[in-house]
Amino acid sequence: MTIAVASGKGGTGKTFFATNLFITLHQQNFRVQLIDCDAEAPDALIFLKATTGKAFDVIRPMPEINPALCTFCGKCHEYCHFNAIFFLPQFRMIHVMQELCHSCGACLAVCPEGAVREHPISLGQVTTYTLNEWAEIAEAKMKVGVMSPVPVIKEALRHISQTAEIVLLDAPPGNSCPFVHTVNSADFVVMITEPTPFGLSDLKQSIETLQELKKPFGVVINRAGTGNDDIYEYLKENDIPLLLEIPFSMDIARLYSRGIIAVEKMPALRKKFIQFAETIEELHGNRIYQR
């Protein structure tokens, strides 16, 4: 079973939830994998002391125009649907803007002079880690200056373990393309939110996306006891499962700020996470606790 842990906005406790669930399931003797798909700012490994395995570069072919061969006909500029080719014919200037290029290959196909060639560039890395033979981690990390994390996320998702019983995907926040590519690989999506007006607003947008994708989902409210009750009314009115409430706690905040997994120090919280997994089993129909 693959579970994506997502949020409509940053700072709701998505990584806190994913890492604590990962450790809880591991302690319950499940073969589990966590993939950190938040490639712009991966931070799961702050909380998980793992051994580095292999690193894989994510390479994209990038077109380059040879001015010595180019006749400045402008065909590559005309056929580029992403406006990634800067072209000033009157000054005989032409240049590929890597930040906008999608490496679709159209410019190579239409150039009559063969002036366009491709060279490989690195978009980021996917690195694997292990806690032990029963617990694996993969981290997607894009390079600074790269426009989209999607290719790096796609590469990370190719490293989903075939032997893991449960795979957790720590998704990027928001509801744009990185979020969509991550949750599309999941059997079930857990939306982490907080009981605030901003939390509810962003949650609604993400839920609309999940409904379009026809993905089963439920909601976890973090820092319960703060904010207002609007989010509870929204869930009830729309028949959306409330999977778990995590209370606002200074003890949790202190542990989190020190990079410590809270369920290892707080038995009551660990029990909540075990109950959460049982709830997912009931909702989704996958047998997590009876193998």
Image (cartoon, rainbow, N blue to C red):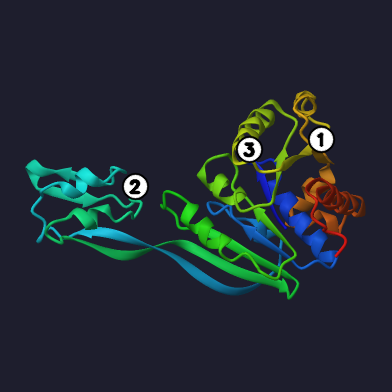
Residue 129 drawn at (x, y percent):
64, 70
The disc label shown at residue 8, or none? 3
Residue 86 drawn at (x, y percent):
22, 45
173 left or right of 165? Answer: left
Circle 1: is it few (<14), some (14-19), or many (20+) Cα within 10 Å? some
The disc label shown at residue 102, or none? none
Of the 4 image quadrants, the one containing the C terminus is: bottom right
Ranked by sequence position, the earlier of labels 3 and 2 is: 3
- Residue at left 91%, top 55%? 267
SS class of the residue under badge 2? loop
Q: Quadrant of residue 222?
A: top right
Give the residue type at disc 3.
Gly
Nearest to viewer (mark 1 / mark 2): 2
Residue 45 drawn at (x, y percent):
66, 61
SS class of the residue under badge 3? loop
The disc label shown at residue 224, or none? 1
Instruction: Report how far apart the C-alphas of labels 3 and 1 lie in the structure.
Output: 17 Å
Nearest to viewer (mark 3 / mark 1): 3
- Of 29 and 223, the residue lying toward us: 29
Give the residue type at disc 1.
Ala
Ranked by sequence position, the earlier of labels 1 and 2 is: 2
SS class of the residue under badge 1? strand
The disc label shown at residue 100, or none? 2
